[in-house]
């Protein structure tokens, strides 16, 4: 059946995931683990669309990160220009190793909208300290709560790491995503619906 204007509907892959929503209601009290001496985190004063796409696409490629891939450059540029959204990049040895994004649109809660390491940085002991950096950055701005969500498409250590950092599960819901085939993302068999 043709779509709007007679165009064929877009080909999609149905993906079934369990999404877990988590919340932290008070800052961690334990000392923050240190990043390695050759690592630093920088809050970008201005993140270009091209650099953001590199970070998002590289970190999320194996975990079905697809929503931001569907945005046009203009839509993504407008989002990145919003002062309540910030992008923070982990550099190690001078090259990007990960990023996180804080979204303050629901203040006084701050949402850790995206968090992850680039493939070459996984397994190097960076995750715990980098996650704590993200949590501390959110609390430093006067948040009353920090939220995050993860799903069964994410790295298997994501949920345990969020819980170990002090996040508490609020709920888990089943979602069916219609991921456009044109994005070329690898969809694990275990996530394919129908």
Image (cartoon, rainbow, N blue to C red):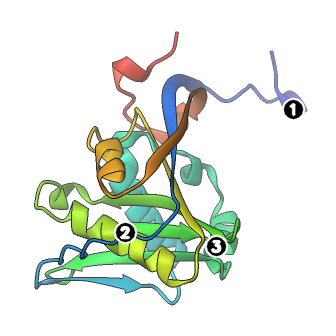
Q: Out of 128 and 39, give the one closest to the viewer.
A: 128
- How far apart are the two marked residues, 3 and 1, measured between alpha carbons? 26 Å
Q: Closer to the camera, 20 or 115?
A: 20
Point out the frontmost of discs 3 and 1: 3
Disc 1 marks which residue? 4
- Front-lying residue, 178 or 5: 178
Of circles 3 and 2, the one toward us is: 2
Name the residue rendered at 53%, 61% in the picture: 25
Instruction: Report the front residue among 144 and 70.
Output: 144
Report which residue position mark 2 lands on: 28
Residue at disc 1, secondary structure: helix
Q: Is residue 43 left or right of residue 8?
A: left
Looking at the rendered image, the quarter that the N terminus falls into is top right
| Residue 36 placement, left or right of 67 | left
Instruction: Describe residue 29's horizontal placement relative to residue 101 as left or right.
Output: left
In the rendered image, is residue 12 in sight? yes
Q: Residue at x 65, y 80 (%)?
A: 81
Using the rendered view, name the quadrant where residue 92 is placed: bottom left
Point 37% across, 57% down: residue: 166
Residue at the image point whose x is 29% and y is 75% from the top = 90
Q: Where is residue 16 in the image (x, y as percent from the top left)?
A: 51, 23
Circle 3 sits in a helix, a strand or a loop, which is it? helix
Q: Quadrant of residue 62?
A: top left
Give how far apart the Cα atoms at labels 3 and 2 are: 33 Å
Image position, residue 88 (x, y; %) = 42, 77
Q: What element carries label 2?
A: loop
Q: Residues within 10 Å of mark 3 (few under 14, many from 20)?
A: some
Q: Earlier in the sequence, mark 3 or mark 1?
A: 1
Q: Name the residue under label 3.
A: 77
């Amino acid at each position: 059946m043709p779509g709007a204007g007679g165009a064929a509907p877009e080909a999609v892959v149905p993906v079934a995931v369990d999404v877990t929503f988590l919340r932290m209601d008070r800052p961690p009290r334990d000392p923050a683990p240190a990043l390695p001496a050759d690592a630093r985190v920088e809050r970008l004063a201005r993140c270009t669309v091209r650099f953001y796409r590199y970070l998002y696409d590289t970190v999320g490629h194996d975990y079905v990160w697809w929503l931001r891939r569907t945005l046009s450059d203009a839509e993504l540029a407008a989002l990145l220009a919003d002062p309540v959204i910030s992008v923070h990049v982990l550099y190690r040895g001078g090259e990007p190793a990960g990023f996180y994004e804080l979204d303050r649109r629901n203040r006084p809660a701050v949402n850790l909208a995206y968090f992850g390491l680039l493939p070459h940085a996984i397994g190097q002991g960076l995750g715990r300290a980098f996650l704590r950096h993200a949590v501390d950055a959110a609390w430093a701005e006067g948040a009353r709560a920090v939220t995050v969500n993860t799903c069964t498409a994410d790295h298997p250590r994501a949920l345990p790491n969020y819980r170990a950092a002090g996040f508490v599960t609020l709920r888990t819901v089943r979602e069916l995503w219609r991921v456009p085939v044109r994005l070329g993302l690898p969809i694990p068999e275990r996530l394919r619906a129908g």
